[in-house]
Image (tube, rainbow, N blue to C red):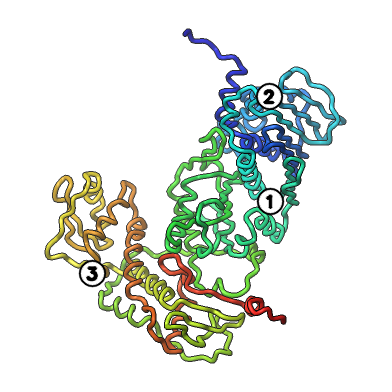
Amino acid sequence: MPIRELPAHLVNQIAAGEVVERPASVVKELLENSLDAGASRIEVELEEAGVKLCRVRDDGTGIPRDELALALARHATSKISSLEELEHVATLGFRGEALPSIASVSRLRITSRERSADSGFMLDGADCDGVSPAAHPPGTTVEVRDLFFNTPARRRFLRSERTEFGRVREVIERIALSRSSLALRITHNHRQILDLPAAVTPAELVDRVSRVCGREFTDNAIYVQRESGGMLLRGWLVRPVHARSQPDLQYMILNGRAIRDKLLAGAVRAGYRDVLYRDRWPAFVLYLDMDPAWVDVNAHPAKQEVRFREPGPVRDFVRRTVEAAIAEPAAAGVGPHDFGAHAASSVVARQSPLAFAMPVSPGRVREQLASYSRLAAPAAAEDHSAPLGYALAQLHGVYILAQNANGLVIVDAHAAHERISYERLKATVRQSSVQVQTLLVPPVLAVSEREAGQVEQHGELLERCGFLLSRVAPDRVAVRGIPALLTGVDPGMLVRELLPGLSGDLVLDDLLNVLDRVLAGSACHAAIRANRRLTIEEMNSLLRDMERTERSDQCNHGRPTLVALSMSELDQLFARGR
């Protein structure tokens, strides 16, 4: 077959295969165009999840009469004019493919009026030369009917109306969170689905987040804000104990653009790594702002994925911010809290010291585990000065019952002590030079040649963390020493757990993360066991330690260490009026 130029209509349909996957893609592109036009209010009307009809009406700047036809021309846009502008692009749309692609697989009509014009004009997508006058308020209406009517194979790939509308709603909710000042109304099959007024004040923003993410999210979220290295991260993180069974409530907005990015989602999850229970997932609404030149938003035809020029610092900034935000002691989450007030406050991430200094003996560490505090002086239950209150009794040798100013606090003694011990062990590893336990008979492990090469490459860094490993054959590694703090742990098992984390760009934090998993098990075995009777003084001492310890509202395995019941909640349990 000879080489020939494809017809324009076929070119548009090929482009539509990348840009217009389903009705949700159409809604996303049209909403982004409205936002770029400066719209403050958008109305979306849908029928059959947008397959039969998708009409988007905005109050933006409108399109001049002589530019309506250009709006349906490929690679025609008002948003960029040079490579320099592309590298600093701040608009949501800029490729100039959306409208012509949509028009090639549907029956499209545009009606628009400039704010300064006396009347509007209408253009039918099937007749790009037929611009005619039409009554219309300032702004633009794009009407898309019979999606994929001329490409039946594409239409057969669509799912049920319920499924497709669910995806449309997800797109709309992401837009609603990314632009809080936007008023948004959605109808589906002539029923109003969503009506969001503009959110300007912190309280209004909280209400919008609650309506999109649910009241449970806003009731159990932490507000975080941190700026560093030209990056600003702000938003809400759900408390670890309320993590979800799937990653279905994760919203990341980069420079006003709602995106799905594996690097950023992974950075957030890494910040939760110490507190997530098994296969749970964090929920969050986060806004990340940075210089547009640092990020390539043209990496994906639908602009849902991005590329960072220097991904390492971005990932580290997000991870450390999240880690610090959820590291607050258990006392911070006890008692009534006003979610709206959190929007005006901030949590400043703390940098963890990574330098090693003074040696600490294993015996001293075991001492710390055996005696977990400076015993606190006994206090009367009526003293409400402490956030976790003071112990009243111990239930079945397992739970501590304490009274605070708000009501009742129930603490799992083993889980709480496990977290306290774990955090102290981590601090010991990070703040002290690691003593090495030399092995009299070094075990030799069969590994892959890649893993053996990584051991050889990172020998100095491994030794800094207390691991003396040497390559004795192309696929063999000898374990000559491990951190003395971990004496009693199977050296082979420990090193095998370490090896998969080694890579060419390995940093100290990667090794410390592996150590944390081992330390979590050590702390668990050393913690207070069930059915051990504690004195009132011991119970109060544990409560005070919880108030001072980061992440103490969850144990090392992600389970909650305490439950707080206010007096009003207790009254409801007993149907008691106050």
Mark 1 or 2 closer to N-term? 2
Residue 374 to residue 129: above or below: below
Residue drawn at the location 36% of the way across and 63% of the way down: 354
Amino acid on which disc 1 is placed: Ser
Amino acid on which disc 2 is placed: Leu
Q: Give the CA distance from mark 1 to mark 3.
A: 54 Å
Contact check, label 1 and label 3, Cβ < 8 Å: no
Q: Position of residue 453 (x, y in %)?
A: 22, 46
At mark 1, the secondary structure is loop
Residue 254 versus residue 198: which sits nearer the camera?
Answer: 198
Contact check, label 1 and label 2, Cβ < 8 Å: no
The crowding category of the residue bearing disc 2, from other C-alpha atoms within 10 Å (few below 14, some 14 to 19, many at least 20), is many
Q: Please state if 254 lies on the left or on the right of 35 as rendered.
A: left
Q: Say whether residue 110 is visible.
A: yes
Q: Which residue is mark 1?
A: 180
At mark 2, the secondary structure is loop
Q: Position of residue 17 (x, y in %)?
A: 56, 27
Mark linked to residue 72: 2
Residue 87 to residue 177: above or below: above
Contact check, label 2 and label 3, Cβ < 8 Å: no
Q: Position of residue 330 (x, y in %)?
A: 51, 73
Residue 2 to residue 348: above or below: above
Residue drawn at the location 32% of the way across and 73% of the way down: 525
Residue 358 versus residue 19: which sits nearer the camera?
Answer: 19
Mark 2 or 3 closer to N-term? 2
Residue 337 to residue 477: above or below: below
Q: Give the CA distance from mark 2 to mark 3.
A: 70 Å
Q: Give the CA distance from mark 1 to mark 2.
A: 29 Å
Q: Which residue is mark 3?
A: 487
Q: Position of residue 59 (x, y in %)?
A: 78, 39
